[in-house]
Every structure is written in structure tokens, then in C-alpha cells.
Image (cartoon, grey):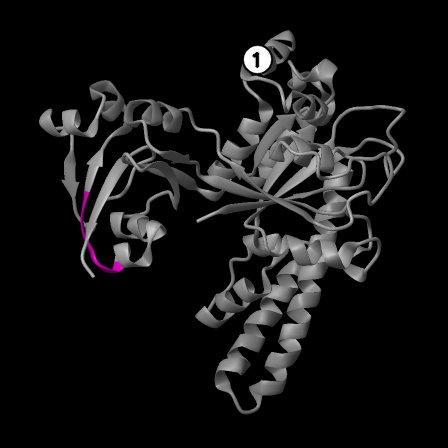
Amino acid sequence: MALSIGIVGLPNVGKSTLFNALTKAQNAEAANYPFCTIEPNKATVPVPDARLAKLSELVKPQRVQHATVDFIDIAGLVRGASKGEGLGNQFLANIRECAAILEVVRCFDDENITHVDGAINPLRDIETIETELLIADMQSLEKRLERARKSAKSDKTAAALAGELEELLAHLDKGLPAKTYAGKTSDALAQTMRDLGLLTAKKIIYCANVDEANLADPDKLAHVQALKKLAAERGADTVVVCAKIEEELQGLSDAEQMEILDSYNVTESSLVRVIHTGFHTLGLICYFTAGVKEVRAWTIPLGAKAPEAAGVIHTDFERGFIRAEVIAYDEYVRLGSEAAARTAGQLRVEGKEYVVNDGDVVHFLFNV
């Protein structure tokens, strides 16, 4: 399964610059004017994982396959996007395809970079973005409600759905997102919400874009403090980046990148944290398969049992699941090979109820 994240925000907050850095490609034009991004830019980015590299050193496979994240960079959002202002309709349509939304807000002042609202205020920017998402969801639900009402006279299921849609609309009308709705949710309503791709039902990651001077200690910034407080209140994750620096790092060797990061007293690229934060937000983990042909990371939901994890490789693996042979990552590395782990009794045979752990090295046996 692929993790998809939509990068959104107002114009000139650093979305496209961040996208350029994330994808290691300069294919999202970053310019000092609104709507420099017109078509959504999409790219598949490998998930950095030192464990995968270590397994590759031991196994020496023909190829290595990382888990991936799909990033989508979308045109800047403005007030009235839900009504078609700016490039809003296109923006909202593409966001519906994403599993999570990365809301990028600017947390630095620069007189050479204009702000669409004239001044830096991350919380106001978030309110603008999320109000537009809310209004768009209400419009989608109203259209679906109209259809349900037309069918209600002859269809009891449609009549029941219409009542639930009315309750959900009332919830949104209070300014509350779909993800906080606690009313009755039938299978029909749940399916409708999935079909509509409700924007306010998606997981949110708040991203503070800071300047070079504050990268080493961003928490001293009032804007960052306010953003983290808001995120904590909403149970959301926050990540701090300096998109400008991250973009400049791309194309350099690992040693050169670390030298630059060290000069800012930073030990890890913030882009690595963006990707890992996305995994945490959506409750995803990775397990590994390791053989001479391929060492590969596979993305699964936290808590997935062995057959479900096998199904990520191929549906036949899940349907015909027999058992899983599992070695904990630490034991695999300590012992140096699958054969050594088997000899040492560290290879476990697990059945259908086994919950796969992050980092497990797994071999599935199946029969179809």
C-alpha cells in the first residue's frame, strides 16, 4: 500500500520548494507570485530506512526496493476556493485522492517574499485552509443528500441515509470537521463518506516552514509555538522544516549534506521527519522480505495480522496463507543471515493470528 500526502497551503508559503526537495527534482516551479503551481505535481518518493540498507549489506541482493510515499503538490489555496476562486476546484479534487494532508504554513518574515494576506500568521492561514475544506465537504454532502431524498420515497435505505446525512451536515455547519462526528454511522453513511473523499475526514499534519536562522531552535519562535499548541489540541502531528535549505541539499553527496546540516546544528534532514511523520500519522509500519533477488520494505497498517501483511505482496498470498517465518530485525542483523537465525532458533513460525511488528523480516508460505 502506498502512503499519499497532499501538500497544501496558501500561495508563497514554500509548498513547491518543499516538494522540490522531497522529490529531489526541480520539477515544481517555485516563484514569488501566487499560483506558480497550476497542475498538481505528483512524485513517488522512497522512504529512507537505515534498516533496509543494513539488510542489503548482509544479503547482497540483485535489487533493493524501498517503501514509498506519493507526494502531491497542489496550487495555492485562497479564500473562496470552494466556490471556484483561484484554482480551488482543481485543488480540492486532487486533495480528495490523498490519505493525509500536509498543511504548510510560513513561520518566518521576509520582505522579499510576499504573503497573500499581507502578514505572517500561521493560525489564520490554517483557518483559511480548513474553512474552505469544510465548505467543500458541505457542498458534496448537500448534493448527495438531495439524491438520497429523491430516492427516499421508494427506498427505505435511502431514507435512512438521508437522515444521517442531515445529522452529519448539521455537525459540519457548526464548523466541526467530519473526523470528529460521533453520531450514528451506518454502513451506507460510511461508504458515502469514503466515496466522497471528505476532506475534513482526512488526517492532518501541520508543517512549519522556518528560515535558516531559526532551524536549529525553531521552538523559540512564537509562530511555531502557536502551531504546535494548536496541533496538540487537535491530536495532530507537527513537523518543522526549512524548505529552502532542504532544496539546496539535493544533488549533494551524503557527506556534503551532513556537513551543511552540521553547520546549522541539525543532525537529521527534516524531510526524513516529514516522511516518517506521515507514517506515524496514518498508523503505518514496514516489514521486510530479504532474498538474493530482492530486499524490500512493505508498508502495512499497525496491528495487521500475518495474512493481511502477506496480501500486500499479492492477494494470492493472503487467500492461500499457510504460515509465516519471522525473524526480528535486530536478531537478523546480530546473527548476520537467515540461515544463522534458523540455526540459533531465532526464526519463528507464526500463524494467522500473528500481528506483524515493525521491522520483522518475513517469509510467507502459501497455497492457492
Q: Is residue 323 magenta?
A: yes
Q: Residue at x 27, y 35 (%)?
A: 291
- Residue drawn 24% across the image and 30% down it: 328
Question: x and y percent of residue 307 in the render?
Answer: 26, 52
Q: Quadrant of the C terminus?
A: bottom left
In front: 175, or 307? 307
Q: Is residue 269 above or below residue 205?
A: above
Residue that appears at 64% across and 13% down: 216
Quadrant for residue 115, please give it.
top right
Q: Secondary structure at mark 1?
A: helix
Question: Which residue is nearer to you in this view: 198 or 335?
Answer: 335
Is the magenta region chiefly helix, strand or loop? strand
Residue 283 placement, left or right of 256: left
For disc 1, the marked residue is 258
* Front position in the image: 56 or 175: 56
Q: Is residue 343 magenta?
A: no
Q: Position of residue 116 (x, y in %)?
A: 86, 39
Please give the range of residues in magenta. 319-324
The relative height of residue 180 versus residue 113 in the rendered view (above or below) is: below
Across and down, in percent, residue 362 comes to: 25, 39
Which residue is nearer to you in this view: 102 or 187? 102
- Residue 5 screen position, x and y as percent: 58, 44
Instruction: Please state which amino acid type lies under the numbered disc 1.
Output: Met
Is residue 46 shown to the viewer in this render?
Answer: yes
Corner quadrant of residue 149: bottom right
Residue at image point 43% right, 28% down: 49
